[in-house]
Amino acid sequence: MGKIGLLDLEGHFAFYCAYHSNPVNILIHMLFVWPIFFTSLILLHFTPPLFDSPFDHLGLVPNFGLLLALTYALFYVCLDKKAGSLAAILCLVCWVSSSLLAKHLGFSMAWKIVLAAQLFGWTGQFIGHGVFEKRTPAPLDNLAQVLVLVAPFFVLLEALSIVIWLRTVSRISCQCESEDRC
């Protein structure tokens, strides 16, 4: 595959789909990608504040976690306005909730939970690729594409496509039953 432009949604999605065609691997990614992002934000909660904020006392510290969440959010909106906006909202909800959880847990407990979740999530994904997809994961073939960090967005697109497909099938089924064609 040729070089993919930074905001080339179709190019990124084609690359992603080339590594995610097995339904079990897709399900594994749907279960683990967002928790990996979420737990990364928990760990980043403990980085120094970038500036003072009136919400620091609540645990909503403008730090590298917020910077990462905003970067993802902006990137996803630039890739696609509608689905990207939903992904951006999810990124910001992840930042807020991970910050609150991190504040509640404290570093001594949070890092253990993050470590366990990261190990479990990444191991699951590598098993998904090795056992079910029968090929190396995308990060091993194209680290630059991973650094763009499109996996959470494409997992969301996969979930949305399933919901839309189920709605379409349900709508068609209802039309068939009402018109006695099935």
Image: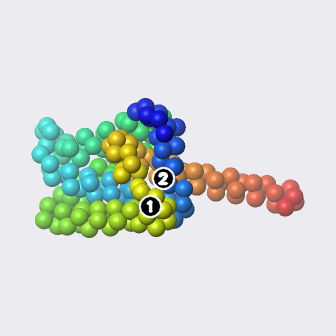
The residue shown at (20%, 44%) is 64
Is residue 38 shown above or below 76? Answer: below
Q: In which quarter of the image is residue 38?
A: bottom left
User: Which mark sits nearer the N-terminus, 2 or 1?
Assistant: 2
Q: For numbered disc 1, what is the local secondary structure?
A: helix
Residue 2 position, x and y percent, is: 47, 35
Q: Residue at x 34, y 41 (%)?
A: 144
Q: In this view, does 14 lie above or below 45?
A: above
Would residue 182 appear left or right of 22 to someone viewing this image? right
The image quarter containing residue 72 is top left
- The answer, for residue 55, to whether it is visible in the render is no
| Secondary element at image label 2 | loop
Q: Where is residue 55 in the image (x, y as percent from the top left)?
A: 19, 45
Which numbered dot is residue 143?
none
129 over 56 or under it: above or below: below
Q: What's the residue at 36%, 52% (across, down)?
A: 140
- Left or right of 11 on screen, residue 63: left
Q: Front-most of 172 and 130?
A: 130
Does the CB distance between marks 2 and 1 fall below 8 Å? yes
Residue 90 location, x and y as percent?
Answer: 39, 48
Near mark 2 (Cα within 10 A), the count class, few <14, some 14-19 or many ≥20, is some
Q: Which mark is residue 19?
A: 2
Residue 37 is at least partly visible in this image = yes
Label for residue 129?
Answer: 1
Please rate how many residues cluster around mark 1, counting C-alpha atoms within 10 Å: few if below 14, some from 14 to 19, many from 20: many
Residue at 38% across / 42% down in the picture?
Answer: 145
Question: Residue 37 at what x, y percent from top left?
Answer: 32, 53
- Amino acid, disc 2: Tyr
